[in-house]
Each structure stands twice: as C-alpha cells, then as structure tokens.
Image: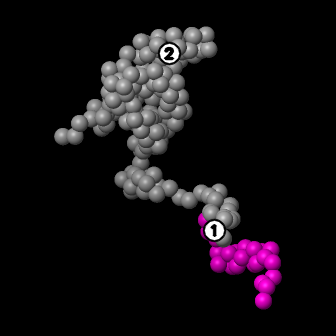
Amino acid sequence: MAEKDYSETAFFGFLRQAAIAGVLKPATARSRKMAAEQLLVQLKSHERLDLRLVDVDQLCSRFHKLQGSTIRDESLQVYNERLKNGLKDFFAWTDDPIAFSTVDGELPEARLVANRDTPDQAVAREQLALNPPRSPHDIFPVPIRPDLIVYLQNVPLDLSQNEARKIAAVIQALALPDEK
C-alpha cells in the first residue's frame, strides 16, 4: 500500500483539485489557499513534509511575532480558522477520500447535482471534467517568422470553411504585394 502524502505540496494540490472536482466550493478552496499561503511560509522543514505535525495556533503565533503590527488580530484569527478547516478536510480526504465530508457540512452545488445525476449523466459530466470544451476566447498563436507571432482571438467554436476563407481574405488584403 502506498504511503499517504501529508506534505505542503499535497495540501495545495488537494485545495486545487477539490475545487475543480466539486468537493469544496471554489470560494472556500481559494480562501483557504490564501490563508495557507500567508501562514505556511513560517513552517519548519520537517513540518512541510508532514502537515500533521503543525500546530496552527503556534504557527499563527510565529507569524504574528514576525509580522508584528502589520497584521490585525482579526485577520490572523480568520487565517487560523481557514487553515485549521483546510487541514482537517485535507487529512480526512487523504485518510479516506470515499467517506470524505467537508468540515463546512455543506455540499457544494457540483456535488448536489452529481448526487441526482443518472448514470449516463454522471458519465457525461465526467467526460466534460476530463475534456472541457474549448473556450471561444482562446488565443491562438500563429508563428509567422522566427521573430514574429500573430495571435488570433474569439475564433468561434463552429467556424465554417466559408467563414475561414473570409478571415483569410481580410488577412491577405493587409499583406504587402509580393516583390518579383
């Protein structure tokens, strides 16, 4: 059996993936990540490898001593609470992802929807998560010369051949005449 990873890196990976997978509300994951980024800079090397060794109250005390009056006590208390809840969820997820339930007690909307999905809908939702549709706002780099790249943006997902020819004609009209 593989050893479970309780490292700082795994924690940040959990926060990122939990929001994507619908395990945590994205806003919750973001706020916990921001609190962790502030506080975890004070970790000792052995704590970075196993976050179960971290005493969040002591960590906040270390942080407050170093930051002094640059951080308000109320803000530090919010960071403390968010990091504690984030770590509780991370440990519960790492220990048993199947039985995981967030300490917030609320199921994110994505989980509520997933719970009422039919098996076919669940498969379709999984496919969308694994292969999200391309955004129409993607920017496409087109290298023209070694020192020049042109970027195309807002190309529709359902671009027809006729529409592509129209775009190409506009580009051709911008070009200088060939020198012969």
Residue 104 or 113: which is nearer the viewer?
A: 104
x, y (%) of residue 125?
44, 52
Q: Which of 17 and 112 is in front in this view?
A: 17
| Mark 1, other Cα within 10 Å: few <14 / some 14–19 / many ≥20 | few
Viewer-proximal residue, 46 or 79? Answer: 46
Residue with the most extreme bottom position: 180
Q: How crowded is mark 2: few (under 14 residues within 10 Å), some or many (20 or more)?
A: some
Query: In screen coordinates, is 70 left or right of 4?
Result: right
- Name the mark nearer the viewer: 2 or 1: 1
Question: At numbered mark 1, what does the secondary structure look like: helix, strand or loop?
Answer: loop
Q: Which amino acid does label 1 sit on?
A: Pro
Residue extending farthest left: 1
> Can residue 61 be seen at all in this image of the molecule?
yes
Residue 66, compared with residue 137, is above or below; it is above
Q: Name the residue under label 1.
A: 146
Q: Residue at x 45, y 24 (%)?
A: 40
Going by the numbered disc 2, the residue's amino acid type is: Phe
Q: How far apart are marks 2 and 1 (CA)?
A: 49 Å
Which residue shows up at 50% across the image and 15% down it?
63
Give the percent coordinates (x, y) of residue 134. 56, 59
Which residue is drawn at the image coordinates 48% and 22% (left, top)?
A: 39
Q: Is residue 130 left or right of residue 68?
A: left
Q: In the rendered image, which quarter contains the N terminus? A: top left
**Start and end of the magenta stretch?**
155-180
Residue 99 in sight in this render: no
